Image (cartoon, rainbow, N blue to C red):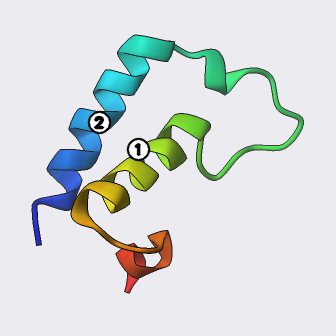
Amino acid sequence: MNNLEQSYKKILEVLSNLFGNKSQLYQRKKLKIFDLEALSLALIAENISFSSECQLFR
């Protein structure tokens, strides 16, 4: 498997540069994962050809 953490950080950095902090607007409850983090995980799963993000956490 490719270096998952390194790929995640690169994609998250690019997405943060594109969108800024727009996904971290005021929320009533504390979020466990932000939108950009979820999007970067989905992009990594697509890049590695996983059919589901659930397979990332096995």
- Looking at the picture, which amino acid does disc 2 mark? Ile
Image coords of residue 8 (percent x, y): 28, 47
Which residue is depicted at the point 63% across and 16% down? 22
Instruction: Verify CB contact (< 8 Å) between mark 1 and mark 2.
Output: yes
Q: Secondary structure at mark 2?
A: helix
Placement of 44 over or under 14, stated as above or below: below
Image coords of residue 13 (percent x, y): 30, 26
**To which quarter of the image does residue 47 belong?**
bottom left
Q: Nearer the viewer, residue 14 or 30?
A: 14
Which residue is depicted at the point 59% across and 40% down? 34
In the drawing, what numbered circle is on residue 22?
A: none
Residue most extreme to the right: 28
Which residue is depicted at the point 47% across and 69% down? 53
**To which quarter of the image does residue 49 belong?**
bottom left
Indicate left or right for 49 with 30 as reference. left
Q: Secondary structure at mark 1?
A: helix
Image coords of residue 56 (percent x, y): 37, 74
Placement of 37 over or under 27, stated as above or below: below
Q: Calculate the distance from the C-alpha at mark 1 to the C-alpha at mark 2.
A: 6 Å
Name the quarter where the C terminus is drawn.
bottom left
Q: Earlier in the sequence, mark 1 or mark 2?
A: 2
Placement of 50 over or under 29, stated as above or below: below
Indicate left or right for 9 with 39 as reference. left
Name the quarter where the N terminus is drawn.
bottom left
For mark 1, what is the residue? 40
- Looking at the picture, which amino acid does disc 1 mark? Ser
Image coords of residue 40 (percent x, y): 41, 44
Which residue is depicted at the point 29% across and 36% down? 11
In the drawing, what numbered circle is on residue 11?
A: 2
Q: Nearer the viewer, residue 30 or 43?
A: 43
Residue most extreme to the bottom: 58
Q: Residues within 10 Å of mark 2 (few under 14, many from 20)?
A: some
